[in-house]
Amino acid sequence: MSDFAALNLLRRLQSARLLRANWQHKTGRLSDQLPALSENELLAALVQADALTRFQAESVLAGKLESLLVGPYRLREGLSNAHVYQAEHCYLRQSVALRLVEAQGADKLLARAQQAAQLQNEVVVPVTDAGPIAASPLARLEKGMGGFYFTSPFIRGHDLHDWLLEHGPQPIDRSCAWILQAAQALADAHAADLVHGCLGPRSVRLEHTGQVRIVDFGLKSNARAGESPLLTLDEQKRRDVAGLALCLFWLLTHHVPNQSGKETFVPPRLYRADIPHELDRLLVEFTMGLRQGLSALALAEGLQPFLTNGSASPAQPCRALSPTIVLPMALQKSVSSSDEAAATRRVLLVDDEPDVRLFSRMLLESIGLECDEAANGKLALAAFAENHYDLVLLDLDMPELGGLATCREMRKLSHRPHLKIILFSGRSHPDEMAQMLLSGADDFLLKPVTAVQLQARIQAALKLKQAQERSDLLNRDLLTLNRELESHLHDRDSDLVEARNALVLALATLAENRDEETGAHLLRLQVFSRRLAQEALRHPALNSQLDDHFIDMLACCAPLHDIGKVGLPDHILLKPGKLNPHERTLMQTHTTIAAGTLKKVAERHGFALAFLKMSIDIARHHHERFDGSGYPDRLAGEAIPLAARIVTVCDVYDALRSRRIYKPALPHADVVQMIRDGAGTQFDPLLVQCFEQCAADFEQIYAELQD
């Protein structure tokens, strides 16, 4: 039966003119093999020979063969825009972009298309053909569509939306040059009272030569959702211009502005600090429609000052596009060693079963991810040390090195922020699942895993990573703006800051005087914290989270870490021996006592909130552990405030170096090794790396500030 099915399908494909010319030469002796082929095998052979596209084969399998024929055209691929396809003339073999539209309103669109064809502007892509189409076959392909098709030359390249997702934010001069080309073409169209209707990043395409082309001119609705479609001609023109300004906003920042109102609009300079103030103001005015005389010509004139000699102009298309990612100068430091957030993600698949790795690889590559494989934990660590991965999919039970141990080692080795690790496991006991998370995993999957589950979990983890990376970039930009503001206040406030620091140290000393063994501990802790934070500022995975102001405030707040001990009874605080469990629980309350006291100060008086917030973070959380087993809140990883993580390392170093009634002082080398061994369990592994870089300075500081 399958013999006749494959033969009948081949005849139907030939009769429908879906097969490309000369397909017999590419498929070899396919006709001789037909009796042994199923329909699926026939379609796979035709796709491999480029006689059919995968899109066409999938449509045929879905019973939509007739729907692939639209007038004299055969649809070959679905494009990113809704109801738009790459198609080919069945006889002339010309490649076109084909848009399907509903019959209602097609006459108006046809009139616009005729008008656009008369512009004779090389930037505006004209409609070259149009015609009606039967509703019934079309409805099989796209439910609810029917009536008319329009074709235009197929422009190879990318639209602005996809270009930015692949290559990241663009240089200012190049972006302005591209939008200038489009603005001048739009000005010609508006002069002829022709509007685009829905201009945005999807409607502007870049050829590989750098030439800008505007597609779908007049073929879209000019009203947004919830608006009346009865816009005046001037309103439609202003909408076009605002859409073109939005394209420039997107090219420069990788963000789409909120145009619902001035209160929620974020200026582009908050996303990218190297945008000139004049360009920032121009984008705000044109995107929000705030400028009088808003026109395409005014936009083109406004962009002229931001072009350089090497920029492209409409008369001279810009050089062939480079795939190099160009980031804002203010953000280059924070992401210099990492790919842009929207770049192709790379995944490491670790499992001792080849079939599982193959299954995972095929699924993940189908959604655009790059995959490497490793058969055990040791091979995974070797690959991890040599390459950058955004996500690791890790089996729990493997020979050589198990999943939990591999996960811990990766967390210690990782120099990249926001690495995601997902563990496979056939176990379902809650304690074992919790142990996975405590070992550094971000998520876990129970075997057997379905394709939908795997893709969904992977995509969710990578979306979170992308959001965290964008947050880091925005945080760096905000810190830059904050530094600019604070520089103007520094001289005025310097005396107040010095007085505050002296009072803080005096207050902390009063609390520490109850513990006679601490000596110069507070002074050393200040210097240790400053030195470790300075080293963290140089670390690519940490430097987006702190700046010079953060470091100054940290050094001031660090002495308050144990201020809560003032609320402990003497028989616990001064006990020379080991505390029993009940006494230890009371001792641990010094963290919450301090945090509660400082919180009340902040609530009652409302001044110096940033200083009090950091003081609260340090006092409450300096006994948390990176693996989540500390107190009082059992926070883990980056949930522990950075200031507290820094003070933890410094406090432990000083405590181990200092003599106590119940223990001797340890030498510097032993303490360094103990802190190194605590990476990933007690301490932040990234801060341990920073500590190792400045450990010699810690030894010198301790020697200079002896008790």
Image (cartoon, rainbow, N blue to C red):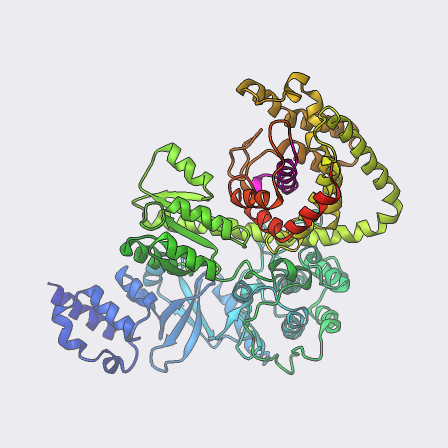
Q: Report x, y in % for residue 216.
A: 52, 68
Above or below, comparing residue 470 to residue 337 in the picture: above
Which residue is at a point 64% across and 62% down the rendered structure image?
Answer: 332
Residue 471 visible somewhere in the drawing: no
Instruction: Identify which residue, 362 or 646, lies in the foreground.
Output: 646
The secondary structure that most of the magenta stretch takes on is: helix
In the image, 380: left or right of 160?
Answer: left
| Residue 1, quarter of picture | bottom left
Q: Position of residue 357 (x, y in %)?
A: 32, 56
Q: Is residue 698 visible?
A: yes
The image position of residue 150, as x and y in percent, is: 45, 70
Figure quadrant of the C terminus: top right
Q: Is residue 444 magenta?
A: no
| Closest to the observer, 550 or 687 | 687
**Left or right: where 510 falls relative to 536:** right
Q: Is residue 148 left or right of residue 64?
A: right
Residue drawn 17% across and 65% down? Answer: 38
Asked if 657 appears above or below 105 in the picture, the reply is above
Picture coordinates of residue 505, whole percent (x, y): 79, 34
Region of the chain picked out in magenta, as a range: 638-659
The one nearer the camera, 707 or 466, is: 707
